[in-house]
Amino acid sequence: MDRKHILIFDTTLRDGEQAPGFSMNIAEKLEMAEILEALGVDVIEAGFPVSSDDDMTAVAEIAKRVSCGVAALARAREEDILTAAKALSAARKPRLHVFIATSKIHMEHKLHMNEQEILEAVFKSVGLACSLCPEVEFSCEDATRTNLDFLKRVAGTAVEAGASIINLPDTVGYATPTETYGIYKSVMGEVDPEGRVLFSTHCHNDLGMAVANSVAAVAAGARQVECTLCGIGERAGNASLEEVVMALRTRNDFYQAETGIHTKLLYPACRKLSSVIGISTPPNKPIIGVNAFAHEAGIHQHGMLSNRATYEIISPEDVGIPKNDMVLGKHSGRHAFEQRLSELGIRMDKEELDEAFEMFKMVAERKKAVTDKDLHAIAGEKRRSIGKGFRLIRFIVNSGNTIPSMASVKLERDGRETEDSCMGSGPIDAAFKTVDRIVRHTKGYESLTYSLEDYSINSVTEGEDALGEVLIKLRSEGVVYTGRGLSTDILEASLKAYINGVNKLLTI
Ligand code: KIV
Ligand code: ZN
């Protein structure tokens, strides 16, 4: 049997980003779009242009920047479709993605439309989209809770109007894999018996079945999977790209399908996303979690030593998880550092490299061994074009369980150094309050308001000298800014993360 090629339609920047807590600014979306393109996704769904000026700009800028497909979402309404087409005007491979809900509950309670009105809206909107864009995808929102006969009529109408891709989303994550398989077989068999239309799947994870449902649709004949990095998205999220890709690859004996994803870039891409949105990865997350390849039980370790395949169905190297062997130390020079980065596929410009090397030297002074994981973390910190402004020069924190915490922090900005101090309810609170004081004493920022919304700390590697990574979220005027800081000292990592977040707030 021939292998089917499955298109990966990434919606991290649209369905993923629209969920609360995962928002990205335009610079971050552009950075992620480049990473997605390098990863090998076929289409990037870049936004929902009519929903905001930011989405309009993000789609237009991403369309200019990448050469893979770029999709823009539109409801089955004229204004949405015209706006989406405009946003896509510079795209090399534009795709207009039109949707309308087709389940009884959505039609009655959200759209207040009957079946005939839905069919008319589909025909009209898909026709308009086809007159403006060479490739049109149509989605029946809440397809898996839609009456099957009506679903077929809607899909047939969209095909008749010119859509070449039909998507049957499991919008509320309600379907089971067996049902999904049946729905695809039935709709495809009736609407497109000759196999001219590309059927797509788009599953949400409310019952933890998004990936299982996506691959069930592939088994039934779907040739495009819509998914997001790390599975981010509304509520429990979307099908996770890395899981779908590795499921198809690892079980290609069963699915007989392949994707164009460069799997060795999966781990770095997911890490980048988690640092951009300020969310850390759960340790047991398949493919990219720290425990995904850890073997603690003695019996497992014994098996692994005689043959890795006893307990390992994917090798960590295949998904780009860096080895944790010592690679560099404090005596390693710039040449060895640059060479190892290039072996790891990490590209940086000269200025970023200079800064990354400085940071490497600092880490190497404090840590016995600098591993590939550390290098990825260092590169992740330095390869960011935004967040310049205040810089940490030094800090002193005095704290204990019987005394109030007191911090003194010195920051530099545009060549001017400022030092201040503050008390707080703990060492981190005192340090952050001191940064706030310095920022608010800076000309132009006196009335700046923001609050700390989230704080998390993770260790990049194991051991007592491990690098700690702090992720924070600041909220200002309804917008969330993430900050990331890295150090072997958690107070320093926390301050760097906080200052990074503040700098983003000031520059964006
Ligand atoms: O989940 C969903 O139904 C969607 C559509 C807009 C494709 O995201
Ligand atoms: Zn969705």
Image (cartoon, rainbow, N blue to C red):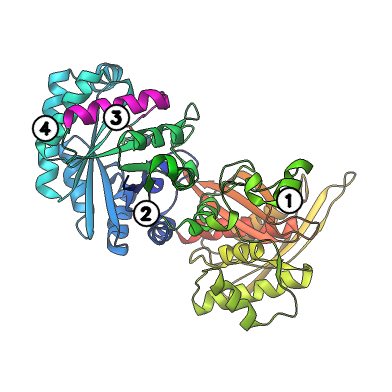
State ligand 1's quadrant. Answer: top left
Along the viewing direction, whichever of 55 and 438 lies nearer the viewer: 55
Q: Nearer the viewer, mark 4 or mark 1?
A: 4
Q: Where 414 falls versus 91 (above or below)? A: below
For residue 384, side relative to residue 151 (left or right) = right
**Which of the two discs, 4 and 1, labels the residue nearer the N terminus?**
4
List x then y, in percent, for residue 275: 55, 54
Whether residues under marks 1 and 3 lie with C-beta atoms below 8 angstroms apart, the answer is no
Q: Where 183 falls versus 82 (above or below)? A: above
Please tell me whether residue 412 belongs to the stretch shown in magenta: no
List x then y, in percent, for residue 474: 56, 48
Q: Nearer the viewer, mark 4 or mark 2?
A: 2
Q: Looking at the figure, which quarter contains the C terminus?
A: bottom left
List x then y, in percent, for residue 132: 12, 49
Q: Nearer the viewer, mark 1 or mark 3?
A: 3
**Which of the two discs, 3 and 2, labels the residue nearer the N terminus?**
2
**Which of the two discs, 4 and 3, labels the residue nearer the N terminus?**
4
Label 4 to label 2: alpha-carbon separation:
29 Å
Amino acid tagged 3: Tyr
List x then y, in percent, for residue 209: 47, 30
Label 4 to label 1: alpha-carbon separation:
58 Å
Residue range (magenta) = 170-191
Look at mark 3 in the image and give the residue it sits on.
Answer: 184
Disc assigned to residue 428 = 1
Amino acid tagged 2: Val
Q: Where 21 falls versus 320 (above or below)? A: above
Is residue 314 something that shows in the picture? yes
Disc assigned to residue 41 = 2
